Amino acid sequence: MKNNVSTAGIPNFWPQLRHAAGGFASFFAGCASTVYFGLARFVANLQIGRMESVLRAMSDEELAQIGITRSDIKRHAKFLATYEYDGL
């Protein structure tokens, strides 16, 4: 007995394909978001470290002129590196 291809039910994979594509898209968007925020955190920590290095290289007299002590360097470096000026 021969099967007639025109009468055989051909499964419609389009809804499954759309669902899988949506899953892949959300997965890759999540990965991209994780990478972006990871890089942003890395750059912020790099800037804080550089600012801390500059402040630690200053003398006690120079630190006193800007109003900080050696124990405040880490906190002040974080403030300076993360401060966002919103304009006038």
Image: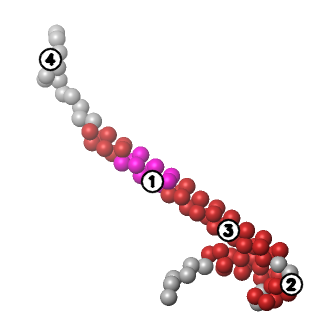
Task: Say whether disc 3 or disc 2 marks the residue closer to the N-terminus.
Answer: 3
Mark 1 nearby-residue class (10 Å; few <14, some 14–19, many ≥20): few
Query: Magenta span: helix, strand or loop, mainly?
Result: helix
- Real-space CA distance between mark 1 and mark 2, rounded to the nearest whole angstrom: 48 Å
Q: Which region of the structure is painted magenta?
A: 22-32
Looking at the rendered structure, the secondary structure element under dot 1 is helix
Lower position in the chain sequence, tag 3 or tag 4? 4
User: How far apart are the alpha carbons under marks 1 and 4?
Assistant: 44 Å
- Which numbered disc, 1 or 3, marks the residue that appears first in the sequence? 1
Of the pair 43 and 28, the residue shown nearer to us: 43
Q: Which mark is residue 60?
A: 2
Q: Quadrant of residue 50?
A: bottom right
Question: Of circles 3 and 4, which is in front?
Answer: 3
Q: Nearer the viewer, residue 15 or 77?
A: 77
Residue linked to disc 1: 29
- The answer to whether one can see residue 77 in this image is yes
Q: Which mark is residue 47?
A: 3
Quadrant assignment, res 84: bottom right
Q: Position of residue 5 (x, y in %)?
A: 17, 20
The residue type indicated by label 1 comes to Ala
For label 4, the crowd category at 10 Å Cα-Cα, with few meaning under 14, some 14 to 19 and many 20 or more, is few
Left of 9 or right of it: where is 50? Answer: right
Could you say which disc has been placed on residue 4 in the image? 4
Q: Is residue 26 magenta?
A: yes
